[in-house]
Image (cartoon, rainbow, N blue to C red):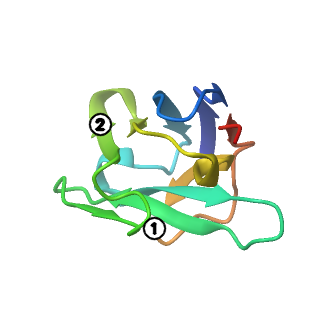
């Protein structure tokens, strides 16, 4: 079973930055071979894909975060990162990491709040 633990969220003013981290574990989980992704959940909306990174390092981003967010990975540490710059209130939400497509189990997520 895959276990994912996100961290790094918080309250930040508009224009600020945050760096999220996600550590994966599990006996059957080969992090280095998995396409990993960050998802965002906001109240009243479906969870949306924010960014993903394949095992070869190629990345994809939602249009709303292109040029502001950067996804990266450190396979030796089974860790996924999301560097978020120029944050806006629209970025507020709970951020989750998971595979792409997602594994059945989700972590607890990490809350990012950018007040308007």
Residue at the location (75% across, 71% down)? Answer: 45
Secondary structure of the residue carrying numbered label 1? loop
> Does residue 56 sit above or below 8 in this rendering?
below
Badge 2 density bin: few <14, some 14–19, many ≥20, Cα 10 Å = some
Secondary structure of the residue carrying numbered label 2? helix
| 17 with respect to 69 (left or right) | right
Q: Nearer the viewer, residue 91 or 13?
A: 13
- Place residue 88 in its image quadrant: top right
Q: Position of residue 57 (x, y in %)?
A: 19, 52
Q: Nearer the viewer, mark 2 or mark 1?
A: 1
Q: Nearer the viewer, residue 81 or 23?
A: 81
> Does residue 40 sit above or below 24 in this rendering?
below
Residue at the location (63% across, 35% down)? Answer: 5
Q: Is residue 96 visible?
A: no
Residue reaching furthest to the right: 44
Q: Quadrant of the C terminus?
A: top right
Q: Position of residue 66 (x, y in %)?
A: 32, 59
Q: Nearer the viewer, residue 9 or 80?
A: 9
Q: Which residue, given by chain and number where applicable, does mark 2 sit on?
A: 75
Residue at the location (47% across, 34% down)? Answer: 15
**Label ID, residue 100:** 1
């Amino acid at each position: 079973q895959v276990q994912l633990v996100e961290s790094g969220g918080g309250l930040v003013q508009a224009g600020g930055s945050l760096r999220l981290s996600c550590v994966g574990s599990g006996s059957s989980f080969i992090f280095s071979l998995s396409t990993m992704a960050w998802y965002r959940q906001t109240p009243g909306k479906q969870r949306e894909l924010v960014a993903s990174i394949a095992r070869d390092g190629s990345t994809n981003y939602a249009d709303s975060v292109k040029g502001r967010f950067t996804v990266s990975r450190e396979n030796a540490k089974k860790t996924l990162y999301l560097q978020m710059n120029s944050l806006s209130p629209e970025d507020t939400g709970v951020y989750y990491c998971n595979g792409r497509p997602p594994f059945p189990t989700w972590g607890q997520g990490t809350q990012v709040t950018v007040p308007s």
